[in-house]
Amino acid sequence: MRADAAALGDTAPEPAEGRVPFVLVVGRELAPPALTVPLTTLAGGSRPGVIDRNYAPGDVERFVPTVELPSGTAHLLLDVQRGEEFCGAVPSAAMAAIAGRGRQLLTVEEGIALVTQYPQLLARNKCFSLGASRCGDRRVPAIWISQGAPKLGWCWEGNPHTWLGMASAGSRR
């Protein structure tokens, strides 16, 4: 992973329109969402991120990766897109389109890392779902803006939202 990150060293750190070259992700064993969401803020903001009240106690922990993650406690996401082209799409259709492109959906931890490292990527009407974390029902976790702060919530798999896309990455290492 160190060599992969070093090779990206000359890549512009500022996100292009809805896209960043890489994100360092620390797994939930070291950085559980309950502790990391409050560390997020909006670009230029100071209000801490929150977990939506619709998560029952212990519910966030039930949303586990549905994809194989690299071994170890940290990994890199490469070629990350917030996926605003999927705003207004039904999440299940967006997930199928992303898979058809050979891209990978993001997990809850990866979405939190994205907002932590690139808070400017979370923008009004350009928020995103995290389709690679599920708990066995129809809920899809997502990060959006509420009351001037990032919010980790969820939406139903069959419901489209005009302000909610589907984040993805080119690869993980």
Image (cartoon, rainbow, N blue to C red):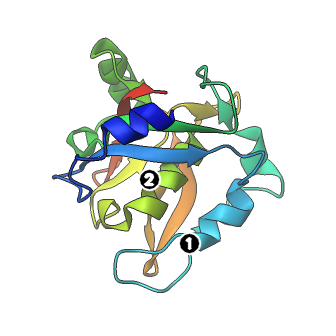
Q: In this view, does 110 lie above or below 32?
A: above
Secondary structure beneath label 2: helix
Q: In this image, 52 relative to 172: left or right?
A: right
Give amino acid for label 2.
Leu
Q: Residue 28 location in percent, x, y?
A: 72, 46
Q: In this image, 125 relative to 48: left or right?
A: left
Residue 114 is tagged as 2
Q: In this view, does 83 lie above or below 125?
A: above
- Front residue of this view, candidates 30 and 127: 30
- Front residue of this view, candidates 136 and 116: 116
Secondary structure beneath label 1: loop
The residue lying at 53 percent from left, 69 percent from top is 40
Q: Name the residue under label 1.
A: 49
| Label 2, residues with CA under 10 Å away: few <14, some 14-19, many ≥20 | many
Give amino acid for label 1.
Gly
Determine which quarter of the picture holds residue 7. top left
